[in-house]
Image (tube, rainbow, N blue to C red):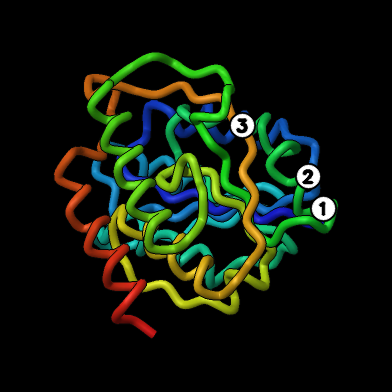
Amino acid sequence: MRLSIVIPVFNERATLPALLESVARVSLDKEILIVDDGSTDGTREYLKDMAQHPGEGVRVFFHDRNQGKGAALRTGFREVAGDIVIIQDADLEYDPQDYPALLKPILDGRADVVYGSRFLGGPHRVLFFWHYLGNKILTLISNMLTNLNLSDMETCYKVFRSEVIKNLTFTSDGFAIEAEMTVKIARAGYRVYETPISYSGRDYSEGKKITWKDAFPTLWALVKHRFFSG
């Protein structure tokens, strides 16, 4: 079993080195695919230096301009060579030490897709109530449209058998990719599991990017891909 770790990156120079060290410490057969989405804070230069001597199993890709998380993920998905694919944000909110728990339902043959939930009892930093409420509302609407009973649709940690990624086509460029993936996974009838994860959320002074405005394209993506897309 080989794990493909897809890391979309946009302006994460302050956290990316520590994140990559944490990923490297995970003792699994793995490849790391880093996609820089037009960073302007020094991340791009850091990754260009890395690309000269990337290390075993590490590949780096560059977008000429910022296109959004979904576009970066599509670039990474096209390049995966492993048996299982996991999405890893480039900040330090999600801990790679959770990988074994996330992989277990797939390795046991019980799941095709696993979501790492921030709301199932794992340790987490206490932050924004309104973000929490917005997440729960979006997850509720997602569940109503997909007939799933997820607790955390917007989580970064989504894990797939590679066949799932190869069989589905995604089009969203921004954060709405989370909703599109969820709808299409449900429509295809894949077996979905959730497992608790730890979560060290950031505030805006620490570089958090998603805002309340991102809820609107997410809502549209849920409706669009449930009723209008192929």
On screen, residue 100 versus residue 210, left or right, reads right
Mark 3: give few (<14), some (14-19) or many (20+) Cα within 10 Å.
some
Q: What residue is pinned by disc 2?
A: 104
On screen, residue 78 versus residue 35, left or right, reads right
Q: What amino acid does circle 1 point to? A: Leu
Helix, strand or loop status at disc 1: helix
Q: CA distance from mark 3 to mark 2?
A: 12 Å
Q: Nearer the viewer, residue 42 or 166?
A: 166
Mark 1: give few (<14), some (14-19) or many (20+) Cα within 10 Å.
some
Quadrant for the N terminus in the image: bottom right
Q: Residue at x 29, y 81 (%)?
A: 228
Q: Position of residue 152 (x, y in %)?
A: 46, 41
Q: What residue is pinned by disc 3?
A: 196
Q: Are marks 3 and 1 in contact (CB under 8 Å)?
A: no
Q: Nearer the viewer, residue 14 or 161?
A: 161
Q: Position of residue 85 (x, y in %)?
A: 64, 57
Q: Residue at x 53, y 36 (%)?
A: 117
Q: What amino acid does circle 2 point to? A: Lys
Q: Which mark is residue 39?
A: none
Q: Residue at x 35, y 38 (%)?
A: 136
Q: Are marks 2 and 1 in contact (CB under 8 Å)?
A: yes
Q: What amino acid does circle 3 point to? A: Pro
Q: Residue at x 58, y 79 (%)?
A: 167
Q: Are marks 3 and 2 in contact (CB under 8 Å)?
A: no
Q: What residue is pinned by disc 1?
A: 107
Q: Nearer the viewer, residue 229 or 149?
A: 149
Q: Position of residue 121 (x, y in %)?
A: 57, 23
Q: Earlier in the sequence, mark 3 or mark 2?
A: 2
On screen, residue 89 versus residue 80, left or right, reads left
Q: Residue furthest left?
A: 213
